Amino acid sequence: MGRLFAIEIIYRGIYQKTLAKNISRAIVLAAHKEGKPGISFGRYGDSPERNGIPAKNFAIVATDDQTLEEGMAKYEPKEVDITISVDDTLCKGVESWAWYGLQPVNRLLKPGGTLIVTSTQPADKLIEMAHRKEYPYNLAIVKGTPSFSGLWVYKDDHTDVRVLGAISKILPDLFSLKSVQEAIMDEWHDSVKAQSAARAHERISAQTVQPNQGNPETPYAFDLPKWHEMGEGIAIPCIPAGAAVADPVNHVEGGFRPDRNPTFKKFSTRTMRPVVDFDTCIKCTLCWLHCPDSCFDVTPENLYDANMQACCGCGVCEAVCPVKECVTMVNETEFKDNSSQWEAWRKDKQGYETWLQDKIKGREERSHGFRYKGQYEEQVPEMLEIARKG
Ligand code: SF4
Ligand code: SF4
């Protein structure tokens, strides 16, 4: 039997769909240059995709047809040589549309396999975010702002070819840089993209992550009902009405917390989360009214606390809030837990103010979507410059 190579690409549904498809397709094309058959496909259960919800593509390559057929007989790979995460906030874990609970980003990696992440963060920060594994694996960073390259209009910042160049260094048995560059020329007819792949190949390096490094928490999970526990026919229960919120200082109750889906959490859906300044909030209710996921808890004093079990990170609350810096979207890599901001503010207002100012200082501009006409033309040269510098 020959050798089978499996690579998964974890991406943000819709925003990064074309990017993930470009990478998985070009992996197969580059391997084909060396006579290796392969196939690239999306994860069946992730369709239809939803904005920002994690999804996966796979590229399966073998040294011969029979090995590929055997590899493809599985529904999807149970282990992979390389996991590519094209958004660093996914290092916290992946809760897809298609399974239940949180999956560690490195879950499918073989012993000694490599996690490739596109990020400007240092390795230590990414290692801290990813769950621990029982055996060592490697981490390699393709340096750059995670690309939210779009679906209908593809913002080509060369992330696709830079990842391909990195793979040719990390897993040279799969394909060489030469094969990658030939596949790029066939597919895109762009020598600058071929150069970007070469630069990423030169600059990428991996470091080993040991079993005692990383997030020690057990990932969020729940038990699926057994077949004999299921009701007859299809029953969709109503959402219960919700309840009041308890003030952690005065121990009075008031306000309103809507009841939420007890099993589908949105911990890994967002790349950014809102940070709320409760001292400057004028209680206008706009964030609460406009939030598409009903995630604001109304507190006993009528403030609005974004509940991190429900927030998908869309940024609507920041956009509608009329008070400057009262709601600020901050990159998800800045947070270690999902606890209530309002509770922290109630317990220590001065401490919360210091925390808030630290979080919102120098926050990067929103990194996905086009906010105004002409942004695409401005950003592409900028991204090409970053890609050139590596
Ligand atoms: S970012 Fe704001 S508007 Fe969007 S889901 Fe979260 S709390 Fe709601
Ligand atoms: S939109 Fe801003 S000011 Fe209005 S209630 Fe929400 S946080 Fe307060």
Image (cartoon, grey):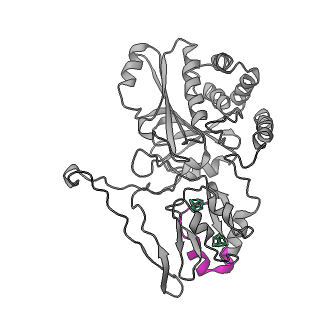
Q: Is residue 323 above or below residue 225?
A: below
Q: Is residue 373 left or right of residue 86?
A: right
Q: Is residue 375 left or right of residue 346?
A: right
Name which residue lies at 50% across and 61% down: 310
Q: Is residue 383 above or below residue 272?
A: above
Name which residue lies at 45% across and 51% down: 102
Residue 223 pos. (x, y %): 31, 54
Q: Is residue 141 above or below residue 326?
A: above
Relative depth, front residue between 249 and 82: 249
Q: Which residues are magenta?
A: 335-352
Residue 219 pos. (x, y %): 44, 54
Ligand 2 placement by image quarter: bottom right
Q: Quadrant of the C terminus?
A: top right
- Residue 375: quadrant of the picture: top right
Residue 367 pos. (x, y %): 69, 48
Question: Does residue 347 belong to the magenta stretch?
Answer: yes
Q: Quadrant of the N terminus?
A: top left
- Report the magenta stretch's main SS: helix
Q: Is residue 220 left or right of residue 22?
A: left
Residue 180 pos. (x, y %): 64, 20
Q: Is residue 205 left or right of residue 339?
A: right
Q: Is residue 283 above or below residue 41?
A: below
